[in-house]
Image (cartoon, rainbow, N blue to C red):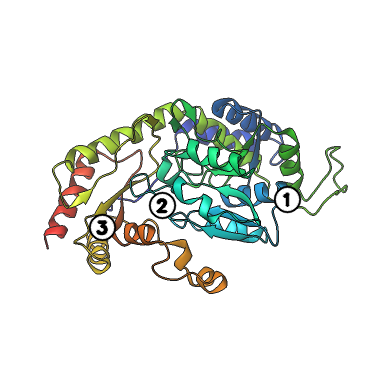
Amino acid sequence: MTIHLSRPDITDREIEAVCAVLRSPNLSLGPRLAEFEGAFARYIGTKRAVAVSSGTSGLFLCASALEIGPGDEVVTTPFTFVASATSIMMAGARPVFVDIDPASLNIDPTKIESAVTGKTKAVLPVEVFGNPAGLDRVCEIAREHNLAVIEDSCEALGSALNGVKAGTFGAMSVFGFYPNKQITTGEGGMILTDDDALADACVSLRNQGRAKDGRWLGHERLGYNCRLSDINCALGVAQLERIDEIKAKRKQVAQWYREMLADENRLIVPSEPANCDLSWFVFVIRLREDFGLKQRDHILEQMRSRDIEVSNYFPPVHQMPFIAERFGYGPGDFPISEAVSRRAIALPFHNHLTRDEVATVCRTLKLLMGG
């Protein structure tokens, strides 16, 4: 049997919630949209929440609401999912990368100021793999330079730093609900903010630029169709109600991995940083420096051949050809990100994993490292 890289955790509760919407006349822009937004805002602790079609669209709408556009720059990390950078490009701005902290794998706060220019409008930090470490310092630097912070919390639902929840550090934040996330709506995302004007702008932008008065053919700005249907929202409400249970399941799987790999000196095994309540998104180990890219890729290939799904998390964004060619980035520009990327392996990680399956993954990984 295949040990899957990720799987959503769907119960009869979620299925019934979705079926109830399908039996109703309100498939979109109905009551479950407002219910999901309200519940999410209360959970995170912000004034407003705006549901959107994906984390990517959420980041783009944040940039648009902040009037970031052509000629502007946004400082971000090259070690992330590509949408953190492409959402900036979608707004017409330039992503300016700085390297990461080798421990947290988040953007290195000490390197941000050197990347700030007169064109910089915002910083877009990412809580990589759910880890909010360093976000407080990033926000301090942004305030010193009068820059907005768009917090990419797409992987960090339920995490906190010093008791402060992920999603509350920036002027705006975004969560994602793809099926591999802590909770899923199938596809979807959520924008969080305490600023009513920014929230209202996002509500309009996601809905074809329609005005607050709700007239269906009244459009006051260039907008987009980034809505999230009531079908998706019903699934989100039911999932969010189980967030503590889901976090606990994922924490248990992470603990099994950490126990079984604790004596493995050929690996860097992720841990929960000090002062963090980590909501585990994925479990990514790193091979030590005497392993190279070819050895890492061989291990990936061999594990997959044994029906164990694994992946490389993340390829450096600045080395993706369409970004490298457009902005002139090249190998060696961000050596820490590149070194981490060459040796990273995402192991199977989801709520349904059993202890025996984790043991199989760990045993196979150790065998292949020895080969």
Say if residue 180 shows up in the picture. no
Residue 31, image x and y in percent? 70, 31
Across and down, in percent, residue 115 comes to: 53, 56
Mark positioned earlier in the residue sequence (2 or 3): 2
The residue labelled by disc 1 is 67
Label 1: element kind: loop
Quadrant location of the C terminus? Answer: bottom left
Q: CA distance from mark 3 to mark 1?
A: 47 Å
* Horizontal arrangement in the rendering, residue 102 relative to residue 169 (left or right): left
For disc 2, the marked residue is: 100
Which residue does the image show at 55% across and 29% down from the upper left?
44
Q: Position of residue 98 (x, y in %)?
A: 47, 56
Graded by Cα atoms within 10 Å as few (under 14), some (14 to 19) or many (20 or more), the crowding at tag 1 reads few
Q: Residue at x 84, y 39 (%)?
A: 214
Does the image show residue 33? yes
- Residue bearing the label numbered 3: 307
Q: Is residue 27 left or right of residue 215?
A: left
Q: CA distance from mark 2 to mark 3?
A: 33 Å
Mark 3 surroundings within 10 Å by alpha-carbon count, few (fewer than 14), some (14 through 19), many (20 or more): few
